[in-house]
Amino acid sequence: MALQAASILPSTVSIYKEGKSNASLKETGFFGVSVPNNHLKAEFDCSLIKSKEFRKRELPVRTIRAQTATTTPAITEAAPEAKKTLRKCVVVITGTSSGLGLATAKALSETGQCHVIMACRNFLKAERAAKTAGIPKENYTVMHLDLASLESVRQFVDTFRRSGMPLDVLVCNAAVYLPTAKEPTYTAEGFELSVGTNHLGHFLLARLLLDDLKKSDYPTKRLIIVGSITGNTNTLAGNVPPKANLGDLRGLVGGLNDLNSSPMIDGGEFDGAKAYKDSKVCNMLTMQELHRRYHEETGITFASLYPGCIAETGLFRNHIPLFRTLFPPFQKYITKGYVSEEEAGKRLAQVVSDPSLTKSGVYWSWNKNSSSFENQLSKEASNAEKALKLWEISEKLVGLA
C-alpha cells in the first residue's frame, strides 16, 4: 500500500481465521493524488496475517471440494437476434463475502439484470453475507474458491462450467494485504502469499475462464481487475515508502520463496506492504497485456479501476478504538478521499455494466463529484515490455507453459 496506517494512526495486528485458511481476502483503499491529473484519491488496505516459517515440504497441495448453491438464471428462448437481451448477465466476482465485493454484488443485484457468482473461500460466510445484504436468492450463486491454491482455482472453473451457466463478466477483486508482517507467508504451491493470491491466483483464473468469456453471447463481455493507487508511483500515495517496484522480476523467476530466491518480485528483502503494492502493479500490467492480446480478436473489454478509499469497513474491526474513531474523519476532512462501501460497490458495478464504460485497456477512477474518468498509470504499471515478461513468467509458474 502507498501508506501504512501505522504511519498516521496507531494500529494493532489482527489475525483473521477462516476455516483452515489464514488469509483475509479484501480490497479497500487509502489516499493519493494523481500528479498529472490533480485528482485527489484515496486508498488504504489492511488485512493483517501473522506469518509462520516456511518449509517447502510442509506445503502439500490440498484437495478442496467445491461447494455450490446454485440457482441457474433463467434464459428465455427467443429469436436469435433478440436472445442476447433477454437473459441476466452472469458475473463472477472474487472476494464477495464482505467489503467491496459484497457491495458490488448487491449493487448489481439491485439492477435486476445480473446474476452474481460469489466466488469465496468461506461458503457459509458468503451465504450469510448475501442474506444479510438482502440479495435475492435468485440473483446469486455461491461457489468455493481459494485463490491461494491453484488447485482450488482449477476446481472452481470446473464447478462453474458444470453449472451450465454462461460467463459474461469476470471481476478479479479479492486481495491479501499484510503490511506489518515481518516474515512471508506462502500459498499452497509455495509462492509468497500476497503475490501468489492477488496476482498468480487471479492470473490463472482469468486465463482459464477466457474461453468461457469468448463464448458469451451477451451484448458486452468484460474482464475487470481491481487495481490500486498504491501501485502507481505517479501519485503522492504511490510515492510513500515502500514504493512498488518489480525490478527485473528475478524473485518471480525464482518462484517467490526463500529456497531458490527472494519471496519478493524484485529479489529484495521481504516487506509485506511492498508485496501488496507489487501485486497490484502485476494486476494492472496483466489487464493491459490481456487487452493487447485479446481485445481486438474477441471484443472483450479489459479494464482496471481504483474505486476510492473505503474508510468505514469491517476490515478495521480488530484495530484499536482510537484508530476506528479517527480514521473515517481523517479520510473525510483531511484527504477528502472518503468513499463508503456502498458507493465503492456502485462504482465497480458501473465498470461491470455501464454502457458508457466499455472502452478496453482503461484504468478507471472517480473525481470528487463521483464522475468516472480514465486515469493515467505510472511508467512501470504501463510498461509493455515488462507486462510481456510478467505474462511469460506467470504462465510457467501456474502451469500454463
Image (tube, rainbow, N blue to C red):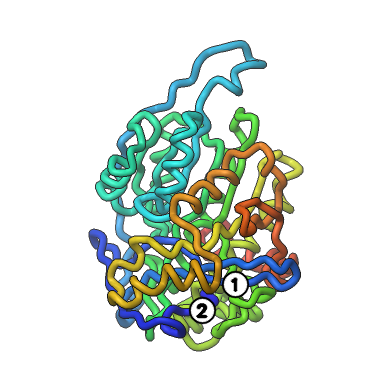
Marks 2 and 1 close (CB-CB < 8 Å):
yes
Numbered disc total: 2
Give the mark nearer the N terminus: 2 vs 1.
2
**Which image quadrant for residue 285?**
bottom right
Q: Nearer the viewer, residue 210 or 317?
A: 317
Residue closest to the far top: 79
Position above or below: 315 against 222: below
Q: Nearer the viewer, residue 168 or 395?
A: 168
Q: Amino acid at mark 2?
A: Leu
Q: Nearer the viewer, residue 340 or 52?
A: 340
Residue closest to the far bottom: 269
x and y percentages locating residue 241 in the rendered image: 56, 85
Mark 1 crowdedness (10 Å alpha carbons): few <14, some 14-19, many ≥20:
many
Position above or below: 332 against 2: above
Q: Residue at x 50, y 63 (%)?
A: 338
Position above or below: 304 against 35: above
Report helix, strand or loop for mark 2: loop
Q: Is residue 198 visible?
A: no
Q: Residue at x 66, y 57 (%)?
A: 363
Residue closest to the far front: 333
Mark on residue 32? 1
Report helix, strand or loop for mark 1: strand
Would you say 112 lies left or right of 336 here?
left
Q: Nearer the viewer, residue 344 or 392?
A: 344
Label 2 sits on residue: 3
Q: Residue at x 60, y 29 (%)?
A: 218
Would you say 202 lies left or right of 360 here?
left
x and y percentages locating residue 159 in the rendered image: 39, 40
Q: Amino acid at mark 1?
A: Gly
x and y percentages locating residue 260 in the rendered image: 48, 82
